[in-house]
Amino acid sequence: MRVVALAAAVALAACTSNPAVIRPTPAPTREPNTLSVSVLLDLSGQRAPSGQPQRDAMQTWLDQTQSGQVKLRVKFVDVAGSDARVLLELRHAVIDDRADAVVVGVPVSLDDSFGQAVQAAGVPVLLTLPSAEPVGRPGGAFAFALAPTPETIARALVSGIAARGLLAPMLLASDESAAAVTERIALAAELARRGMTGPAPVPLAQPDGPQRVRIAAAVARSVVLTGASAPYGDVIRALPATLAAPVYLSYLTETADVTNLRDQSVIVTWPGSRSLAPFPALPAAGARTFLKVFGDRHGPPSTLAASAYDALALIDAAAEIAPSELDGARLRLRLEASTFAGVVTQYSFTSSRHAGFAVDDLVYLRWNAVLGVPYVAP
């Protein structure tokens, strides 16, 4: 009976006592006129291209005097070549770090998983590597592509090769990375659009892949190597110096990879921004400053590095329009209605177009070993 009575008393006390007050955990107070930006890069791991040049370029921007009303607080995050970690760190940036904008400098696809993560984040996500037009895809309302689309790059590549009469036979090699697969699919689609069938890719990762590339290059009229340039270094250096076929590299080419080719650097060409080549015309003043400062520290920048520099400048410009309204929704709307003269290109976004690269600024570059700079290929 005592046990029953005690239980009844406890139950009665629970019913009649005042309910516990649960107070929400206060959110961290935002520092006035300060914008938080998280940057997701591959700073370790095997995936190429490395994010270090992009980080170096962003640090170049941060080292400049931020004279506006808004201060950017940037956090660099290493995703170490992991697609799963990209999703995890995007969530962490928005929920835990309360990022107002995110820059993603690794290969991603606006498919259901990544696109839904961007949509849930609800802040502008700037993509520095080639991506399909975001609008109309999952998360496309918040994603902004700073590089040309894979379709645009493929169209420029095929047009250039066709103009030189070198479309067939074509050697196509792939390291079968996600970026390489995207590139060769876009190339096949562009050739099909012109009524042509693309060549079967030679898989570089197979044991005999490099040898097959060297043998096929001897009879090909053009050589297209898809994916980041770093994995192809040994293959290109092993090609005969008398190779007549031009070697086309990816938009993901880092300048250091070209210079590491030594004498073979003269046989490669790759797509990039005309603004980063001092010939045949001098770049604009902003690009000249970036080229000088970055070049003194790290050597000539790649287009990827310059795009990362522009990403911070774009976010800063959007924030300066209304320094007291720095939430992600307002930043997105300002980016969507902006035209910005960056180092790489003049970006222009609208509600129906979030791929802001000006196509006229996409050129093919070659390396001038004497001057140590890229120049626009004829």
Image (cartoon, helix red, strand yellow):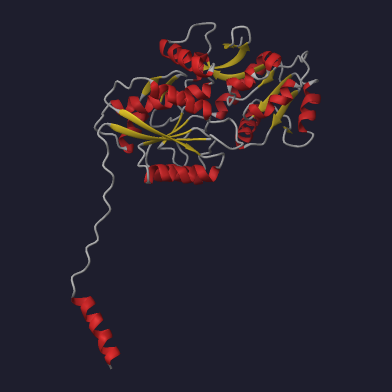
Residue 167 against residue 32 in the figure, above or below: above
**On the rendered image, what quadrant is the N terminus found in?**
bottom left
Q: Position of residue 114 (x, y in %)?
A: 49, 43
For residue 216, side relative to residue 108 (left or right): right
Q: Residue at x 43, y 22 (%)?
A: 60
- Residue 245 visible? The answer is yes
Q: Nearer the viewer, residue 161 or 342?
A: 342
For residue 19, side relative to residue 252 (left or right): left
Q: What is the quadrant of residue 76 in the picture?
A: top left
Residue 161 against residue 95 in the figure, above or below: above
Q: Position of residue 173 (x, y in %)?
A: 71, 29
In this figure, what is the number of numbered marks?
Answer: 0
Residue 257 against residue 207 in the figure, above or below: above
Q: Position of residue 347 (x, y in %)?
A: 42, 22
For residue 88, side relative to residue 64 (left or right): right
Residue 314 against residue 16 in the figure, above or below: above
Q: Residue at x 47, y 12 (%)?
A: 292
Q: Position of residue 48 (x, y in %)?
A: 60, 32
Q: Residue at x 26, y 34 (%)?
A: 325
- Residue 148 visible? The answer is no
Q: Nearer the viewer, residue 208 or 140?
A: 208
